[in-house]
Amino acid sequence: MQYLRTATALLVATVVVVVSANKRDLCADGSTDDNNNWYCQNVTAITYTGVGGSGSYNRVTSMDSNGGGCSSVAKGYSGTLSPLDEEVSLHFRGPLTLKKFAVYTPGGSLGSKRREAHVRRHVHGHGYGHQQVAREAEAAVGDMVTAVINGVAETWVNEWSGQSATPAPVAGSPSSGSLVPPANLPTPSSTSSSATASSSSTSSGSGNTAPSSGGWGRMAFYNASANSSEGLVFLNHNGGTGSGVFDYTYGNSLSYASSDGQNGAASPQILSDCTLPSSSEVVIMSSRKCGANNGACGYYRPGTVAHHGFAGPSKAFIFEFNMPSTGQTAASIYDPVDMPAIWMLNAQIPRTLQYGEAACSCWTSGCGEFDIFEVLAPGDKRAKSTLHGNIAGRDSDFFGRPEGTPIQVATVLHNDNIHIKILDREFNFGADLDAETVADILGTTMVQTNTVSLFALSG
Ligand SMILES: *[C@@H]1O[C@H](CO)[C@@H](O)[C@H](O)[C@H]1NC(C)=O
Ligand SMILES: *[C@@H]1O[C@H](CO)[C@@H](O)[C@H](O)[C@H]1NC(C)=O
Ligand SMILES: *[C@@H]1O[C@H](CO)[C@@H](O)[C@H](O)[C@H]1NC(C)=O
């Protein structure tokens, strides 16, 4: 799946940068085969390009708890990031300590009211990932531009006018947008002679992936040390204990998780500041319950706890966690001991049947899973990522498993790409993911280096 992109001319801040990028995973630099799991390079960021597509999957429409099986209808999908633009749930398997977690979306906010557009100043030294770059008077890609939208001055990082479905302040889009590649060009846009993700290279390189409005707003947040959470709910698979249902056909449905994550609970609980034991799983979804008659959630298993997932073609999940080893060894290959993981599912999957009969979940027909940080063998020190679905692929480069000090990892879905990046500076989980931080994450993960892998999916 490696291929060569020829030069792309890109006008960036009055400097013409000629790009020639050989987009690839880093397996040519060396690989190891451990029991059919390939491991290539130890990286700090991986970008999957070409994630979305069009197709269909089987949406479950009924589940017979008396052994009659499940029925479904074909559901077509298309568009940026599709089908992972649909609602997704986040899954955590121990041994894992989740210290903080936040979800950001363009225009997202906590609370019922939409966040008002507010003036965002380009202040040097503000925020994580700040790029100290001189701005030209005329807007070029990567520049901060300001416009008055609905009477409010709003500032954001300029980008070309792609097919972003985000609520962009289109009225203010500068004409220089036409100078940059189209959104669907699946190639890293810019690299100067320096391969590292320095601030100067990212400011230009990030232009083609910058968000289309100012910052992204925090729509869900969990802080274990503060015993606080907003906009999200902790679930697990203990239906029949306090909440949800159990039957002999499908087993336990989703339930609210007890504060230690080990049992069911009658109502939402905040996950305590704890290490989830090996094999146990906690699921995070939105605090919004599915409406009556299934509503926008679609069909779900009767009696299950049913909450919305996190929807949209642009969304960022930031995790602070570690995965301490228990030293256990597996009794069998079906025994996932000491194999921690963080992954994302189309939220319909856990709301019908995450584990069990294939016809009772849209998983087999491709409604989407993305493994973000998954340890594939007991005790292994490496974590890999994988896209499952009708478009699928696994980068064999890996991240080091964080066994001690928690690390902060961003997973950003945007413009048909998924970026995973180990953040190299303290991220404060504030109410906004400012535009420059988003641009930094997107930009630095689009420039291939020996610690950044680019994995092109072919649809
Ligand atoms: C998380 O909680 C700790 C302990 O209460 C607090 O010091 C920290 O500021 C909190 N972080 C955020 C982003 O709220
Ligand atoms: C966390 O907060 C909940 C209420 O939101 C409370 O019931 C629980 O005791 C708290 N846990 C700790 C460890 O303070
Ligand atoms: C991967 O790299 C990180 C950072 O250099 C290091 O801490 C970790 O031990 C490495 N892990 C493996 C399995 O090579």
Image (cartoon, grey):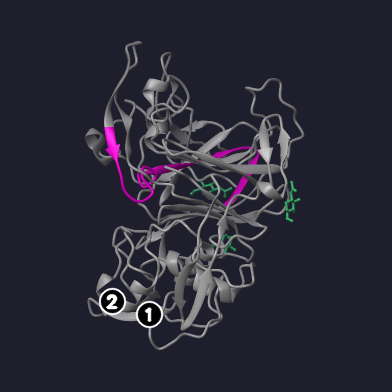
Q: Inspect the image, locate mark 2, and give the three-letter code of the amino acid beneath it.
A: Gly
The residue that disc 1 covers is 145
Is residue 222 visible in the rendered structure shown here?
Answer: no
SS category of the residue bearing label 2: helix
The residue that disc 2 covers is 172
Q: In the figure, 41 relative to 172: above or below?
A: above
SS category of the residue bearing label 1: strand
Is residue 417 visible in the rendered structure shown here?
Answer: yes
Residue at the bottom extreme of this rendering:
137
* Residue situated in front as seen by the camera: 148 or 20: 20
Dot placed on the residue nearer the N-terminal end, 2 or 1: 1
| In the image: residue 447, left or right of residue 247 | right
Pointer 2 and pointer 1: residues touching (CB < 8 Å)? yes
**Quadrant occupied by the C terminus:** top left
Magenta stretch bounds: 75-99
Q: Inspect the image, locate mark 1, and give the three-letter code of the amino acid beneath it.
A: Val
